[in-house]
């Protein structure tokens, strides 16, 4: 689950992570009132969407008067903001964050993510604040400092020293402030079951203080039961409606850009299925894991969601029968075709418990657009061929 910048900064404030003051607004008039409450003569009007790159897309602008605050808020609210993370369809801006201006002397990058290879969180820092970290990693990887933190010991002084020395922070007072900032951010990450925290940019002011000028957070959905306050921050208008609908039926669905719909049980098998489709010359239209309790209703809902994508030209059903028997899945597929108008070829590969019985069920059903496959490679090849009209 992701949250907005203003919500991330609310969490930061609870842990003493310094940020500029700001107030969220839904209308231009409210934005002006917020600016008046903050005071001063320089404000930043920030679009609130679940994506990075807002500044480059025109969603972050400086205002030097209340009239400008109203004008810029009016321009940003209701716009479809396109960034490198939204895709070409963009996201509708429904909120803006009015933030006080800051005295920016330097811009850094700071983030905390899980390193699955090391099996522990890593803190990433860079002097290239304000730039896309992916671009920095590609073009100048030496400018990214990575410090792994073993959860058994937590953030220690030597972690902080490795960060400040790597960033070239030599002033002792600034070193202490940065280490305190990083320690607090690590605590935010661990205590809230976050999957990712990113501050880009983290600024150093003229007074040598460090402020989170931005804030991006994502959380482990499976841990939200421990954090009802964070779950209350969920903005479903920012989520893909098909993914949201799928989750209500116990399906894990992610939309992709290809033409072959995938219905698989198990995330690992789903990833292997998509890789094999790519290897065979096709492109997957989605990731869809029906889980271990697939039945006619969930399979029908899976077909329905997949077929909402007009680019889908074939569906590859790849199920390994372990917890759920293959014959039950086969009957579920046949029932689903009665419930949903499946107008594209469906390639079915069933293996595991009662696989021979399942093959017989599909054969005897004699449905023209349901095509049996013998194994993963055969199924992927047939799906690619069907998508090409062969």
Image (spheres, rainbow, N blue to C red):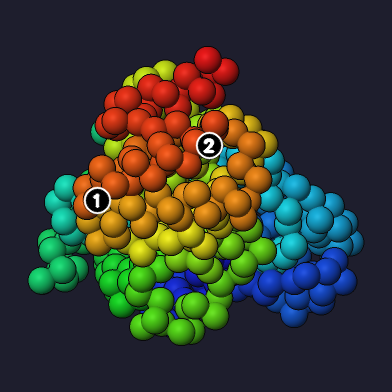
Asked whether residue 129 is in view, the answer is no
Measured along the vertical axis of the image, is residue 129 above or below residue 310?
A: below
- Asked whether disc 2 touches disc 1, contact meaning CB atoms under 8 Å apart, the reply is no
Residue 362 percent coordinates (x, y): 41, 41
Q: Is residue 228 left or right of residue 64?
A: left
Of all residues, the one furthest to the top in this rendering is 390
Q: Is residue 85 left or right of residue 58?
A: left
Which circle marks residue 354 in the picture? Answer: 1
Residue 64 percent coordinates (x, y): 78, 57
Which circle marks residue 367 in the picture? Answer: 2
Task: Give me the residue at 83% from left, 69% from top.
Answer: 27
Residue 37 percent coordinates (x, y): 75, 80
| Mark 2 surroundings: few (<14), some (14-19) or many (≥20) residues within 10 A | few
Estimate the spatial distance between the alpha carbons at disc 2 and disc 1, rounded to whole Å.
20 Å
Task: Give me the residue at 41% from left, 37% from top.
Answer: 363
Q: Is residue 122 left or right of residue 9?
A: left
SS assignment at label 1:
loop
Q: Nearer the viewer, residue 194 or 105?
A: 194
Task: Give me the residue at 45% from left, 27% from top.
Answer: 383
Measured along the vertical axis of the image, is residue 77 above or below residue 384?
A: below
């Amino acid at each position: 689950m992701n949250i907005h910048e203003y919500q991330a900064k609310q969490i930061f404030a609870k842990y003493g992570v310094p940020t500029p003051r700001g107030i969220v607004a839904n209308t231009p008039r409210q934005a002006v009132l917020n600016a008046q409450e903050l005071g001063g003569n320089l404000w930043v009007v920030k679009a609130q969407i679940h994506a990075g790159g807002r500044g480059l897309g025109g969603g972050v602008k400086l205002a030097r008067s209340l009239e400008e605050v109203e004008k810029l808020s009016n321009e940003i609210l209701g716009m479809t903001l396109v960034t490198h993370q939204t895709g070409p369809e963009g996201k509708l801006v429904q909120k803006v964050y009015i933030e006080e201006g800051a005295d920016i002397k330097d811009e850094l990058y700071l983030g905390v993510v899980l390193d699955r290879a090391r099996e522990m969180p890593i803190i990433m820092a860079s002097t290239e604040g304000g730039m896309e970290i992916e671009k920095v990693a590609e073009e100048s990887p030496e400018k990214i400092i990575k410090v792994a933190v073993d959860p058994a010991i937590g953030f220690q002084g030597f972690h902080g020293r490795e960060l400040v020395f790597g960033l070239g922070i030599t002033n002792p007072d600034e070193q202490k402030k940065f280490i305190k900032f990083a320690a607090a951010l690590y605590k935010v990450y661990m205590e809230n079951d976050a999957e990712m925290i990113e501050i880009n940019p983290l600024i150093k002011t003229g007074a040598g203080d460090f402020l989170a000028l931005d804030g991006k957070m994502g959380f482990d959905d499976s841990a939200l039961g421990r954090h009802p306050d964070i779950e209350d921050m969920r903005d479903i208008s920012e989520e893909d409606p098909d993914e949201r609908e799928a989750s209500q039926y116990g399906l894990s669905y992610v939309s992709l850009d290809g033409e072959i719909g995938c219905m698989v049980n198990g995330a690992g098998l789903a990833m292997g299925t998509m890789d094999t489709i790519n290897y065979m010359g096709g492109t997957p239209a989605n990731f869809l894991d029906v889980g271990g309790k697939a039945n006619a209703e969930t399979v029908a809902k899976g077909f329905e969601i997949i077929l909402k994508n007009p680019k889908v030209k074939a569906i590859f059903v790849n199920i390994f029968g372990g917890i759920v028997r293959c014959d039950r899945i086969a009957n579920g597929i046949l029932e689903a075709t009665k419930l949903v108008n499946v107008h594209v070829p469906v390639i079915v590969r069933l293996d595991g418990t009662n696989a021979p019985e399942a093959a017989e069920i599909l054969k005897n059903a004699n449905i023209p657009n349901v095509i049996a496959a013998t194994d993963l490679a055969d199924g992927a090849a047939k799906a690619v061929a069907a998508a090409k009209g062969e």
